[in-house]
Amino acid sequence: MSIRVSEIASQEDRQLAFKIRRIVFCDEQGVSVEEEFDGHDDICRHYLVSVDAHCVGTARTRALDSGQIKIERVAVLGEYRGLGVGRTLMRRVMEDIGDVPMVLNAQFRTKSFYKALGFSAVGDIFDEAGIEHVRMIRNC
């Protein structure tokens, strides 16, 4: 199995990433299209992960006014979860961010995944798009 992560450079790849987000967040988890596509995509850096040339995951990063980089919209198609795809994607994203503090809103059920990558939960559990989340940070 060959896992490849690349920064999105074409409109075609961006549409593939959006399709993955629609499948994972809207179809599978019931997030509304309006909430998923929040108007921030044009100011974000986007990633696409492929397994054996099949596009199976995506993520985006966004610079915040606080100086932190927020990792968002991390999604892997269901049949590719548990195979190291998400971990490989996150490691590439974190490598590109470098020594800048990182923040993300993790679905509560995925908290241990991000904890294993060096993130720590801060604050209380909160609702985002009808799903329990927890804010997590990683200081370098």
Image (cartoon, helix red, strand yellow):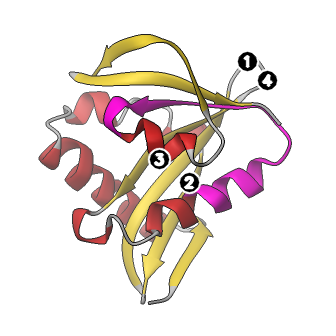
Closer-to-camera residue (102/110): 110
Position in image of residue 42 (x %, y %): 55, 41
Of badges 3 and 1, nearer the viewer stands: 3
CB under 8 Å between discs 3 and 1: no
Q: Is residue 93 magenta?
A: yes
Q: Amino acid at mark 1?
A: Asp
**The residue stretch that appears in magenta:** 90-109
Left or right relative to 69: residue 13: left
Q: Between marks 4 and 2, how big is the CA–CA gap?
A: 19 Å
| Residue that carries the numbered disc 3 in the rendered image | 113
- Mark pair 3, 4: CA separation: 24 Å
Between discs 3 and 2, the one toward the N terminus: 2
Q: Is residue 93 above or below residue 107?
A: below
Q: Which residue is mark 1?
A: 65
Describe residue 19's horizontal placement relative to residue 32 as left or right.
right
Front disc: 4 or 2: 4
- What is the crowding at mark 1: few (fewer than 14 residues within 10 Å), some, or many (at least 20)? few
In the image, residue 10 sits, relative to residue 97, either above or below, namely below
* Marks 4 and 2 in Cβ contact (< 8 Å): no
Residue at figure coordinates x 75%, y 55% from the top left: 96
Q: Position of residue 119 (x, y in %)?
A: 62, 36
Which residue bears the numbered disc 2?
46
**Which residue is tagged 4?**
67
Q: Are marks 4 and 1 in contact (CB under 8 Å)?
A: yes
Q: Nearer the viewer, mark 3 or mark 4?
A: 3
Q: As shown in the figure, which amino acid type bears the numbered disc 4?
A: Gly
- Return the disc, 3 or 4, that comes first in the chain's sequence: 4
- SS of the residue at dot 1? loop
Q: Position of residue 43 (x, y in %)?
A: 61, 38
Q: CA distance from mark 4 to mark 1?
A: 5 Å
Number of numbered discs visible in the structure rendering: 4
